[in-house]
Image (cartoon, rainbow, N blue to C red):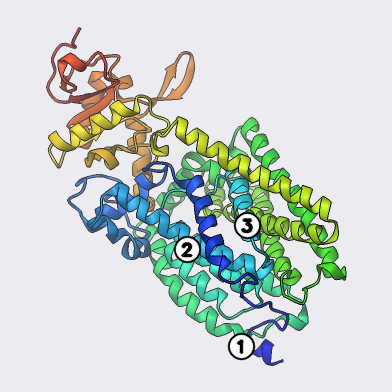
Amino acid sequence: MADLASGKSPVAPKAVSSHGGFAWFEWAVILAVFFVVGGAPPPHVNETHYLTKAKHYWNPSYCPGDFFLNSADPHLAFYWTFGWVTRVASLPATAWIGRFVAWALIAAAWLRMSLAVVAVPWTAALSAAAWVALVERANFAGEWVVGGVEGKCFAYALVFFGLAAMFRGEWRSPWIWFGAGSALHVLVGAWAVLGGFAVLLTERRGNRPSLRAVLPGLILGGVLSLAGLLPALALERGADPATAAEAARIYVFERLPHHLAPLSLSAEELSRRAARFGLVIAAFVGLCAWQFWGERGDPPKRISADGELHVGALGRAMRFAAFSLLCNGAALCLEAALKDEPLTAARVLRYYWFRQADVMVPLATAFALAAFVVWMLRRRAWVGTLVAGGAVAGCAWFLGGLAVSRLENPQPPATARLEGFADWRDACLWVRDHAPADATFLIPRMGHSFKWYAWRADVANYKDVPQDAASVVEWKARCADVFPTMDINGKETLASYPDQLGVERLREVARKYGATYVITRRYPPLDLKVVYPEKERRADCYWTVYEIGRSRPASP
């Protein structure tokens, strides 16, 4: 009873490694795995979004007048704990620093979780590689953890430290970790809290701590979470209900349906996602059955004398993941039931119901796989060797394929959908050196790396959607002006480049939003003044910078 009063399960395994100092080496191996997965040249997909926002927060003279950067700042804890690095380091250097700090924390948390489940050398590295492979290749809603740097990377690291404590049966500290994670990303931490409650409520009665035992941790975690919760709640401040509802609809069904509303995707895309995630679920269910069989009394799977295999810890990981799957099912039912009420559906679905399963089902599957390999090696050595070899080979194939593809194409992920990357970067750097600091540009729809390279404001792009309700609605209006729906080759398609609007419409849009320059494709040429590249290079450069407001005949 003393253990229960302290919030600690009487069957909790010790949080120590059975292989001593080797843990540091295994941590370094996990860090190397994360580098292979997320080590693309900056900027990564979301780094142009989060790090430019952080830089502008600390230095308003960076891209002054930019609509997105001047919108509400919902990630204040991230700006204060890490964003200040942009004051002393370049954006690429900030990205690398942030990545390594986040990866190091995630690797340390992963090692602690692994030691709680199966404290055998190399199982932490194996499970980490399997986890990132499953998250990368078999997610349902596009969630990721290891990649570019943003607030959620640090939030997941803190949540994983909380899960490590929970897996050990320590019920006082997880809520503190989850609250700290909520401060950096409120939804990542909030869903972890709900999952933690699900695990707590399904603990065996003899292992379940009293409310009084966990209450101090809950209170402290709640206080820490306010750093993320209060800025999030302020995003609708001053917006009327109609604007708030429309902003939610835009955010869920127009900007982020791939994360938030999967049933609105095409049948082909939805089937592809369901098929790949279904394979992970099948593996998860099979390993759950194996784990449950062990808890029912298979002696070789019970906690061994040296504390290497911990069935109770694995069971908590499985139940946490199972809760996230229930959330997926509930969200799919809600989306289907509210298909004729998009405003209501959006208000519910905007909370990222599918995020946690993308991370936690692979997590539990990876740990169970590692435990299964150890168990098989002990019971049937040759079968265990075969299973272990297959798991290692699969992870090596995944990591090797990533490494080779990155060597073949080292282009930063944030520019992957832009042609002529080298010319794009050169044009942006020219803008940074020659355009007025307060200039505003009309840019391509997928040109969200413009601010990263050029340090100048843009009217709008597809990636940089603000977070506050009023700005979301304005962002939609700006995109409708700059990237209207057009008939392209007999198909209704959104415009991707400013040149598709034509000179007269470009002038109208530029006057409306105060733009003074346009960066777009070299062909077709526009009847505007070319300021970059030089005349002798115009036939070779993919991108052209125009000054808008004065015109001259297009160059032959």
Task: Give the residue drawn at x 64%, y 56%.
Answer: 127
Which label sits in the foreground, 2 or 3? 2
Name which of mark 3 and mark 1 comes first in the sequence.
Answer: 1
Q: Is residue 330 above or below residue 212?
A: above
Query: In this view of the protein, can residue 296 be seen by the observer?
Result: no
CA distance separating discs 2 and 1: 30 Å
Q: Which residue is mark 1?
A: 212
Task: Please tell me in which quadrant of the rendered image residue 393 appears.
Answer: top right
Q: Residue at x 58, y 64 (%)?
A: 111
Task: Name the foreground residue: 116 vs 209.
Answer: 116
Q: Amino acid at mark 2?
A: Leu
- Residue 295 in view of the camera: yes
Residue drawn at x 72%, y 44% as measured from the top left: 278
Where, quadrant-wise, is the N terminus in this rendering? bottom right
Residue farthest toward the top in the current orientation of the protein = 556
Which quarter of the figure is the C terminus placed in?
Answer: top left
Q: Amino acid at mark 3?
A: Met
Q: Is residue 379 left or right of residue 174?
A: right
* Residue identifier under label 2: 105
Mark 3: give few (<14), some (14-19) or many (20+) Cα within 10 Å: many
Cβ atoms at labels 3 and 1 below 8 Å apart:
no
Instruction: Give whichever of 139, 304 is nearer the camera.
Output: 304
Residue tagged 3: 360
Mark 2 or mark 3, earlier in chain: 2
Q: From what the image shows, is residue 260 above or below residue 488?
A: below
- 450 or 304, which is in the foreground? 304
